[in-house]
């Protein structure tokens, strides 16, 4: 089982993020809010959205590193065929393990809620 995270697993364009947000399906808990939509790729992709409300660039970068690591470690537990946008909650004080649990739980809830044939 490989734990690398290639660029093909990332949402990078504004258009890809907008498509996920426009679908308006989300799940979350006290640490993480996850927006999602189905894709036709057979693997799950993710994007990060960390606003300036979280603090200076150093704090935002740390949050992004934690979230990327959570995705890297849990990528084989996530339901396949989803595009996810991850948004950390403000002042949650979450650790890597908290983000891992939140991500897997939210992704599974979204996968059950999303129709199997949602448009790409």
Image (tube, rainbow, N blue to C red):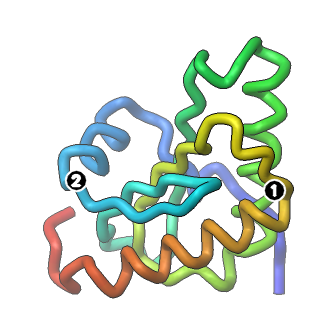
Query: Badge 2, how many Cα within 10 Å: few under 14, some, many 20+?
Result: few
- The quarter in which the C terminus is drawn is bottom left
Does residue 88 appear to the left or right of 82 in the view shown?
A: right
Q: Quadrant of residue 91?
A: top right
Indicate the position of residue 54 as horizontal and vertical percent values. 66, 24
Does residue 22 appear to the left or right of 76 in the view shown?
A: left
For mark 1, what is the residue?
Answer: 69
Indicate the position of residue 63 as horizontal and vertical percent values. 76, 38
Q: Earlier in the sequence, mark 1 or mark 2?
A: 2
Query: Which residue is depicted at the point 76% across and 14% down?
Result: 57
Q: Quadrant of residue 23?
A: bottom left
Indicate the position of residue 99 as horizontal and vertical percent values. 72, 60
- The quarter in which the N terminus is drawn is bottom right
Mark carried by residue 36 = none
Q: Secondary structure at mark 2?
A: loop
Q: Residue furthest top?
A: 56
Q: Is residue 97 above or below residue 34?
A: below
Query: Which residue is depicted at the point 22% across and 85% down?
Result: 116
Mark carried by residue 24 = 2
Query: Which residue is depicted at the point 81% across and 24% down?
Result: 59
Query: Badge 1, how many Cα within 10 Å: few under 14, some, many 20+?
Result: some
Mark 1–mark 2 Cα distance, whole angstroms, equals 25 Å
Q: Is residue 58 above or below residue 90?
A: above
Taking depth in this image into account, of 56 and 76 the one nearest to the observer is 56
Check whether the beta carbons of the residues at disc 1 and disc 2 lie within 8 A of each other: no
Does residue 73 appear to the left or right of 16 in the view shown?
A: right
Q: Secondary structure at mark 1?
A: helix
């Amino acid at each position: 089982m490989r734990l690398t995270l290639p660029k093909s697993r990332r949402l990078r364009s504004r258009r890809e993020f907008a498509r996920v947000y426009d679908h308006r399906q989300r799940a979350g808990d006290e640490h993480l809010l996850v927006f999602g939509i189905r894709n036709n790729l057979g693997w799950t992709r993710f994007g990060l959205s960390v606003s300036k409300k979280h603090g200076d660039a150093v704090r935002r970068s740390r949050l992004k590193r934690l979230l990327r690591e959570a995705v890297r470690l849990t990528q084989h537990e996530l339901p396949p065929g989803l595009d996810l946008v991850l948004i950390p909650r403000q002042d949650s004080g979450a650790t890597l393990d908290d983000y891992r649990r939140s991500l897997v739980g939210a992704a599974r809830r979204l996968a059950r809620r999303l129709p199997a044939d949602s448009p790409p």
